[in-house]
Image: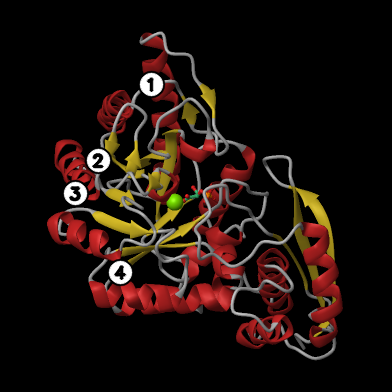
């Protein structure tokens, strides 16, 4: 019933104005799914390969689509993704592109759900999903690779840990974003926006900590529940042989660990992503040892949604949380496997968007389907609100 009858691919725009791959999957009984690949700017060295979209589309048409059409059932997601891997034949999707692979994988899941008459989260997660929702981590102030002349730390993220519902959490993050704008205004700081819609002011990281602290406190007082904040340091982007470059200062690994640990305690941070370079399992382990009992230390570029890199991290005691980006690894099955391995070892999964996004809402469903404790998908801007509003709809049984 869910047999794939056709797969079509095209180039569409992403939020940065770059072309990306969109896939449509149709099943024999009329099910339809459409999905588009996101794209990173601060990409990890070990991510699956994103090819130029026209190359990825041509290769997938030649190698993958003939193996899917009339052959594979969308109801069996693992079969879809195994077929994509076999068609590609490499470890990192460098033949058909992780962008073609992930678009087809997600579109097939949606076609499967549509054929079965289920919301996507239920098709992926089963009958008992849909009551628990992730806490949205919302990018409020940022710089790094997402905005020039702004903070060195890539993202300062609101974390509404005390919100009574996912909708209230989503609205709280938007309020923090608004309050941060007022506070920057009061300081006479002009602020453009970065790729994800976060404010990108020309201020120091120290000032950004102050603005965030005040913004979350003000909104928490106003709404009456606890809001913390966290960081994506994206430290690989700051790192070279000399150390971590903060403009006026270069920090050694030991200084970096001490700095992050100090910030965790000074600001009661709920979350710290990529505090150290993507090759530094040892540094991650040291920091986790120091502060992992009171905050999440999350690996993005470190783990790249890859079970083998995650297993190395588990063995080393590096981090206590993993960022999950389906396009980093190329398929929903691989993303699921990473989440399952993480859960088994007490690592929290944070389902994540990329800085280049589309209106695609798959990750909202993925977060609910896997009972993930967190989702990182921005705060404002259409390609971010697409996911946030989908979470609200799922909670309202309106998908
Ligand atoms: O580093 C990150 O976590 C992401 C998303 O915020 O950025 P990018 O997609 O550029 O890798
Ligand atoms: Mg990151």
- Kindly indicate the quadrant of the structure image that contains residue 91: bottom right
Q: Earlier in the sequence, mark 3 or mark 1?
A: 1
Query: Which sits in the foreground, 119 or 210?
Result: 210
Left or right for 129, reference 92: left
x, y percentage for residue 396? 52, 55
Distance from Cα at disc 4 to Cα at disc 3? 24 Å
Give the residue pinned by disc 1.
203
Q: Residues within 10 Å of mark 1 (few under 14, many from 20)?
A: some
Give the residue pinned by disc 2.
226
x, y percentage for residue 38? 64, 55
Residue 347 has which mark? 4
x, y percentage for residue 277? 36, 54
x, y percentage for residue 179? 39, 23
Q: Earlier in the sequence, mark 2 or mark 3?
A: 2
Distance from Cα at disc 2 to Cα at disc 3? 32 Å
Query: Which sits in the foreground, 281 or 260?
Result: 281
Give the residue pinned by disc 3.
254
């Amino acid at each position: 019933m869910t047999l794939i009858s056709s797969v079509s691919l095209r180039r569409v725009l992403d939020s940065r104005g770059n072309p990306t791959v969109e896939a449509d999957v149709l099943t024999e009984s009329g099910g339809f799914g459409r999905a588009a690949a996101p794209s990173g700017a601060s990409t990890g060295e070990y991510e699956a390969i994103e090819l130029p979209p026209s190359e990825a589309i041509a290769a997938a048409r030649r190698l993958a689509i003939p193996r899917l059409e009339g052959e594979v059932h969308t109801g069996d997601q693992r079969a879809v993704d195994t077929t994509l891997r076999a068609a590609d034949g490499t470890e990192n999707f460098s033949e058909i592109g992780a962008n073609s692979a992930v678009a087809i994988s997600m579109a097939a899941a949606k076609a499967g759900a549509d054929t079965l008459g289920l919301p996507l989260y239920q098709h992926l997660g089963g009958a008992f999903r849909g009551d628990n929702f992730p806490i949205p981590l919302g990018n409020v102030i940022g710089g790094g690779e997402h905005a020039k002349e702004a903070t060195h730390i890539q993202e300062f993220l609101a974390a509404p840990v005390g919100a009574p519902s996912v909708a209230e959490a989503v609205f709280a993050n938007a309020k923090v974003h608004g309050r941060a704008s007022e506070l920057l205004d009061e300081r006479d700081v002009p602020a453009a926006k970065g790729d994800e819609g976060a404010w990108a002011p020309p201020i120091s990281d120290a000032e950004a900590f102050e603005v965030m602290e005040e913004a979350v406190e003000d909104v928490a007082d106003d709404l009456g529940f606890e809001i913390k904040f966290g960081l994506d340091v994206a430290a690989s982007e700051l790192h070279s042989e000399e150390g971590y470059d903060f403009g006026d200062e270069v920090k050694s690994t030991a200084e970096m660990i001490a700095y992050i640990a100090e910030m965790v305690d000074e600001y009661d941070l709920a979350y710290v992503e990529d505090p150290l370079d993507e090759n530094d399992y040892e540094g991650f382990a040291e920091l986790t040892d120091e502060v992992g009992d009171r905050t999440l230390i999350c690996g993005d570029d470190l783990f790249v949604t890859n079970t083998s890199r995650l297993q190395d991290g588990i063995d080393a005691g590096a981090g206590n949380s993993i960022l999950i980006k389906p396009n980093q690894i190329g398929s929903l099955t691989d993303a699921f496997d990473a989440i399952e391995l993480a859960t088994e070892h007490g690592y929290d999964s944070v389902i994540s968007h990329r800085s280049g996004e589309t209106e695609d809402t798959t990750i909202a469903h993925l977060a609910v389907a896997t009972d993930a404790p967190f989702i990182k998908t921005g705060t404002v801007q259409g390609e971010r609100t697409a996911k946030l509003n989908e979470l609200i709809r799922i909670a309202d049984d309106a998908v």
